[in-house]
Amino acid sequence: MSAWQRFQIYNLYIPSREFAHGFRSASRAIRERLGLRKKRANEVGWKLPAVHWSSICRPNGAQFLETDKADGNVNLTELAVLNALCRTYRPKQIFEIGTFDGRTTLNLALNSEAEVHTLDLPAEELESSEVIGADKRYVDKPSSGARFTSPPHSALPCVKQIELLLGNSAKFDFSPWHGKMDFIFVDGAHSYDFVVNDSDVALKLLNPAGGVIVWHDYGVWPDVAKALQELKEKKPGLPLVHVKGTSLAVSVSGEAA
């Protein structure tokens, strides 16, 4: 990726998205006050402290692969923030809960020198798992990590950094990785019990010296918002914030802060 393309993403595309997001939010709030719009039953307000992405990370030469978004992927703004977080904090060990098609996995490896461990629920275990509702379409796919296990990207040097693990995060034995991870990305099933469990796992995986934990779909899936807001209440010392204009929640702690 050229410096100009990177400039376009961080200095043109993201600000335009931020403006559009702010305009929609303001318009929604005004219409609700005027009685022209009713709040939907499943809407959960964003209660976490909100910060601008540039307050927690810098692009620092971030690179991008597979910028085309499929349903279930982070959007380009969120991918840019994840890549910038990697470039800023330079993790050596990354754990991702929820591989899906491997787009985020590939970019985490590309933007770090880390060993990237990524866990996904294989489609053949769908019927025996507790994954329900809208999450099923993200499990019922041809293969996990297709964007890095298939050509042309499967031959890239950064792919050698990736370890693909298969299993149900509610039952998987994470103990070999406890206390060793500098960066954890939580993007598994979106039901409340799964989010609570995966968040607990993330805290156990985190290096005692600190590091970065990122959650996807905060404010998009009500159960994700509920679980993270409860986590903040239970652990008020956890520096958990919402990145404005995205569905990312981020905690940067310890020596990484």
Image (cartoon, helix red, strand yellow):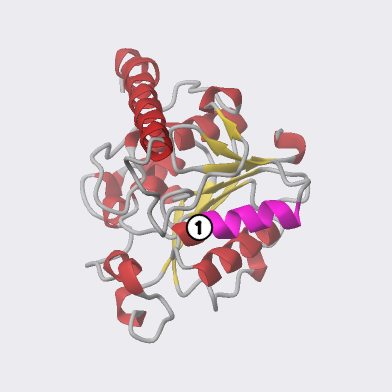
- Quick one: SS at disc 1? helix
Any part of residue 61 in sight = yes
Q: Position of residue 252 (x, y in %)?
A: 66, 39
In this view, 151 is above or below 42: above
Badge 1 is on which residue? 224
Asked whether, in this view, residue 132 is left or right of residue 194, the answer is left
Q: Position of residue 198 (x, y in %)?
A: 57, 64
Of the residues shown, which amino acid type is indicated by label 1? Val
Confirm whether the magenta stretch covers residue 228.
yes
Foreground of the two, 234 or 10:
234
Q: Residue at x 37, y 41 (%)?
A: 35
Say whether residue 142 is left or right of residue 9.
left
Front one among 73 and 148? 73
| Magenta highlight on residue 136 | no
Snapshot quadrant of residue 6: top left
Q: Quadrant of the C terminus?
A: top right
Q: Is residue 75 above or below residue 196?
A: above
Q: For the point 62% across and 37% down, which residue is it? A: 49
* Bounds of the magenta segment: 225-235
Residue 96 seen by the camera: no
Decide if residue 152 is on the left or right side of residue 249.
left
Q: Residue furthest front?
A: 35
x and y percent of residue 30 in the render? 40, 31
Location of residue 193 by image quarter? bottom right
Q: Nearer the viewer, residue 29 or 95?
A: 29
Seen in the picture, residue 105 relative to 188 is either above or below; the reply is above
The quadrant holding residue 173 is bottom right
Q: Write the residue at 45% across / 21% down.
A: 61
Q: Main secondary structure of the magenta part?
A: helix
* Residue sitting at x 27%, y 40%: 66
